């Protein structure tokens, strides 16, 4: 399903604080948004985004009618800027505009343009563009919640209900938040904890170039109006965002580094939908044999030809002799073997199986002879669908297999052109029914694919009475334990696709940038560097305790082609 995502970037002066040793909070937020928007662009041309910047001196968004004089008429949602007019398909220019976002210290006293107002504007943009359309909607907020929030209760609650009706999640990336904000604020923020305000005033400011503009500043709070809530404490603002995300099914993520923010963004992107990458079209450029120059047509275009793959076969004993076509035949793959078949038989087999899936039972075996541990997925449920006779036959077979404690060995062809898969039919037990009504198909391996794995007990190679060695081994295992979510499938990406995508994004800002190589990518399957650094003292203690010893080879004499290397075994290490 195509996505519609609104990104909200807090551009208040507090976002200029350094988040890491080199990047500010705003730099990390911009990099995360650029990374996420780039992934959306590469995934599908139908995805649409909108980027809203909070606390800006100017006001520009889709709610302002063309030709409106902002100097004389106060616009709705002032001091909010959309980098595009509403929700649109992202472009390269949008990425450049995100990179140029800067903070303005003159907006610190501005009352309007906070994160809450930007969420209201984002909800209106989503409703205007995606109402009654199939979109996966999402609002992602990057903020440190350092500026005050003003909440008008009635429109705010209406918008929250509308977001829930649209199934739109709000995800808040808290920069400078407590790492366990969601756990700290389990109880929604009560209304009396906020300060109320019923008024404001405007003051005039003068820009560097002499241009004057007016801004709203907060007035003294007055408890006579309970319809406007003013959040002055950072803890209350964080708690409000947590409550808002819980109401919409989202979450608050407290990220402490730029890498965590990028990983969060990348993880959300990879688990949202499957990316489709265009295939590379291979063609051959024609060259003049005499001159060596590229051949061009009348319009000056390079003349190309399609590359075709022609397979030739040779005998094993005579690899140089190519077999002629008359000595080759068609074969059907059955497991790891190829079964030769004639052309007439092959056509007859296709006609026999062209009506759909084919399930053929070969025989029956006891459950002790076919252990469940050898069966593997993906499983398929066999049912009779709308046919009462088929349902009765399958139910009878399932209950007979359960009573006799047997499984049915069979082959399954899902499509007419597919290869047969060997598996077993077992009764499908369900909680709602006492007796099985359906069957489940599970794959079975071939005999050559089953390996009995065994490992020698550590008690045979390590003396348990030596507490010092046992403690060194335990410390080594504990120091190299991976944290939860380290090998998350949603975070493991292809380095080839990643390098291609990053090269395209970088060339948006600098067309002369060199391609991103695969070696520059961080391998997600490697042990994290911080774990290796913390385990270095334990590794040194392990190598000092268990000295390496060369193991004798079976044939100490060197033969032609051998390098004479020393073979070491784990037992010899000890």
Image (cartoon, rainbow, N blue to C red):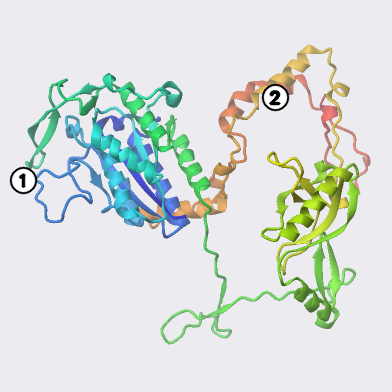
What is the count of numbered marks? 2
Quarter of the figure that contains the C terminus? top right
Quick check: 161 above or below 383? above
- Seen from the viewer's position, the closer of residues 277 and 520 is 277
Between marks 1 and 2, how big is the CA–CA gap?
Answer: 70 Å
In the rendered structure, find residue 477 and report the number of the disc placed on it: 2
In the rendered structure, find residue 495 and report the number of the disc placed on it: none
In the rendered structure, find residue 72 and report the number of the disc placed on it: 1
Q: Nearer the viewer, mark 1 or mark 2?
A: 1
Comes first in the chain, label 1 or label 2? 1
- Seen from the viewer's position, the closer of residues 99 and 191 is 191
In the visual, does 195 lie left or right of 243? left
Which residue is painted at 72% across and 50% down in the image?
A: 379
In the visual, does 368 lie left or right of 25? right
Q: Give residue 162's position: percent from left, percent from top.
A: 33, 43
How packed mark 1 is, by other alpha carbons closer than 10 Å (few <14, some 14-19, many 20 or more), is few
| Pointers 1 and 2 in contact (C-beta within 8 Å) | no
Q: Give residue 445's position: percent from left, percent from top.
A: 82, 51
Q: Give residue 550's position: percent from left, percent from top.
A: 84, 31
Q: Give residue 533's position: percent from left, percent from top.
A: 59, 27
Q: Quadrant of residue 18?
A: top left
- Seen from the viewer's position, the closer of residues 415 and 542 is 415
Would you say residue 513 is visible in this rendering?
A: no
């Amino acid at each position: 399903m195509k996505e519609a995502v609104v990104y909200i970037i807090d551009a208040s002066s507090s976002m200029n604080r350094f988040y890491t040793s080199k990047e500010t909070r705003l730099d990390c937020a911009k990099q995360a948004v650029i990374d996420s928007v780039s992934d959306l662009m590469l995934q599908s041309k139908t995805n649409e985004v909108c980027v809203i910047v909070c606390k800006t001196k100017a006001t520009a968004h889709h709610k302002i009618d063309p030709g409106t004089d902002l100097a004389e008429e106060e616009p709705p949602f002032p001091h909010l800027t959309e980098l595009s007019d509403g929700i649109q398909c992202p472009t390269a220019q949008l990425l450049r505009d995100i990179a140029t976002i800067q903070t303005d210290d003159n907006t610190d006293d501005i009352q309007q343009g906070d994160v809450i107002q930007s969420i209201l504007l984002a909800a209106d943009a989503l409703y205007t563009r995606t109402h009654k359309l199939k979109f996966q909607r999402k609002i992602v907020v990057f903020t440190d919640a350092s500026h005050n929030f003003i909440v008008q209760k009635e429109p705010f609650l209406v918008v929250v209900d509308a977001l829930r009706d649209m199934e739109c999640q709000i995800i808040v990336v808290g920069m400078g938040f407590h790492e366990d904000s969601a756990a700290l604020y389990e109880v929604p923020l009560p209304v009396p904890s906020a300060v109320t305000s019923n008024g404001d005033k405007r003051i005039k400011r003068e820009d560097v170039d002499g241009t004057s503009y007016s801004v709203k500043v907060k007035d003294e709070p007055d408890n006579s109006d309970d319809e406007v809530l003013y959040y002055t404490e950072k803890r209350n603002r964080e708690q409000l965002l947590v409550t808002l995300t819980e109401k919409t099914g989202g979450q608050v993520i407290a990220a402490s580094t730029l890498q965590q923010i990028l990983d969060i963004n990348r993880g959300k992107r990879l688990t949202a939908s499957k990316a489709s990458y265009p295939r590379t079209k291979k063609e051959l450029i024609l060259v003049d044999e005499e001159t060596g120059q590229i051949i061009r047509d009348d319009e000056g275009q390079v003349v190309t030809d399609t590359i075709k793959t022609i397979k030739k076969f040779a005998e094993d004993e005579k690899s140089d002799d190519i077999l002629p076509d008359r000595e080759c035949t068609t074969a059907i793959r059955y497991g790891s073997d190829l079964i030769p078949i004639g052309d007439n038989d092959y056509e007859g087999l296709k006609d026999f199986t062209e009506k759909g899936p084919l399930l053929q039972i070969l025989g029956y075996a006891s459950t002790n002879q076919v252990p469940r541990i050898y069966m593997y997925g993906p499983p398929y449920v066999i049912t009779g669908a709308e046919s009462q006779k088929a349902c009765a036959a399958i139910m009878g077979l399932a209950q007979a297999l359960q009573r006799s404690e047997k499984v049915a060995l069979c082959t399954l062809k899902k499509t007419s052109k597919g290869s047969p898969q060997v598996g077993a039919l077992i009764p499908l037990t369900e909680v709602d029914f006492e007796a099985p009504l359906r069957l489940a198909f599970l794959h079975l391996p071939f005999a050559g694919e089953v390996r009995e794995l065994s490992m020698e007990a550590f008690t045979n190679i390590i003396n348990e009475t030596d507490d010092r060695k046992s403690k060194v081994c335990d410390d080594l295992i504990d120091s190299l334990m991976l944290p939860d979510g380290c090998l998350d499938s949603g975070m493991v990406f292809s380095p080839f696709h990643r390098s291609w995508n990053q090269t395209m994004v970088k060339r948006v800002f600098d067309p002369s940038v060199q391609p991103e190589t695969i070696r520059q990518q961080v391998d997600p399957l490697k042990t994290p560097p911080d774990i290796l650094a913390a385990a270095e003292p334990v590794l040194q203690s392990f190598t000092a305790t268990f000295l390496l010893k060369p193991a004798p080879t079976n044939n100490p004499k060197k033969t032609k082609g051998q390098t004479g290397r020393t073979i070491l075994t784990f037992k010899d290490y000890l």
